[in-house]
Amino acid sequence: MKKEEHFDTIIIGGSYSGLAAGMALGRALKRVLIIDSNTPCNRQTPYSHNFITNDGKTPAEMASVAKQQVQAYPTVHFFNGLAVQGSGTNNAFKITVAPGETFSGDKLIFATGIKDIMPNMDGFSDCWGISVLHCPYCHGYEV
């Protein structure tokens, strides 16, 4: 992609919600950019549950299939990187990504999900989603 490329919609976040938005807009023939830093909060979780038709699959496997399906729509584009700055108002947004490329769009969707804040305890973050569990719906049945 070239600098200053313009899109109907820019989506910041390329996990499940960002991909779902991208698919819906791609099916509407909208020109879409999905910016994703590839650091989902569930990246080290060995499996996921409570996603109908995907129960027990890894989060990475589900996201990979979803991305493949969204890539079938030629008006949806992807940028692997981190959005570091944004400005604008309705119908005139600018997003800058590391290392400095800028994209513009009429609409902006934030699909960044959540960021878990870990306590400062040795080994805690290494166990997050594996043996330190916070969601009874994702892991409660198994433990």
Image (cartoon, rainbow, N blue to C red):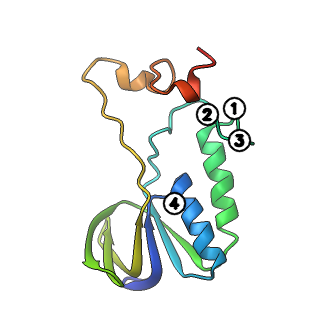
Q: Which mark is residue 138?
A: none
Q: Position of residue 37 (x, y in %)?
A: 42, 55
The residue carrying mark 2 is: 48
What residue type is disc 4 on? Gly
- Secondary structure under tag 2 reads loop
Q: Which residue is mark 1?
A: 56
In the picture, the disc for residue 18 is 4
| Residue type at the position of mark 2 | Ser
Q: Are marks 4 and 2 in contact (CB under 8 Å)?
A: no
Q: Determine the CA span between mark 4 and mark 2.
A: 18 Å
Of circles 3 and 2, the one toward us is: 3
Dot 1, how many residues are within 10 Å of its Cα: few (below 14), some (14-19), or many (20+)? Answer: some
How many residues crowd mark 4 within 10 Å: few (<14), some (14–19), many (20+)? many
Residue at numbered disc 3: 52
Of badges 3 and 1, the one in the foreground is 3
Answer with the quarter of the image where residue 67 lies: bottom right
Residue 127 at x, y percent in the picture: 44, 21
Taking the image as shown, residue 112 lies to the left or right of residue 76, namely left
Report the Cα–Cα distance between label 4 and label 3.
19 Å
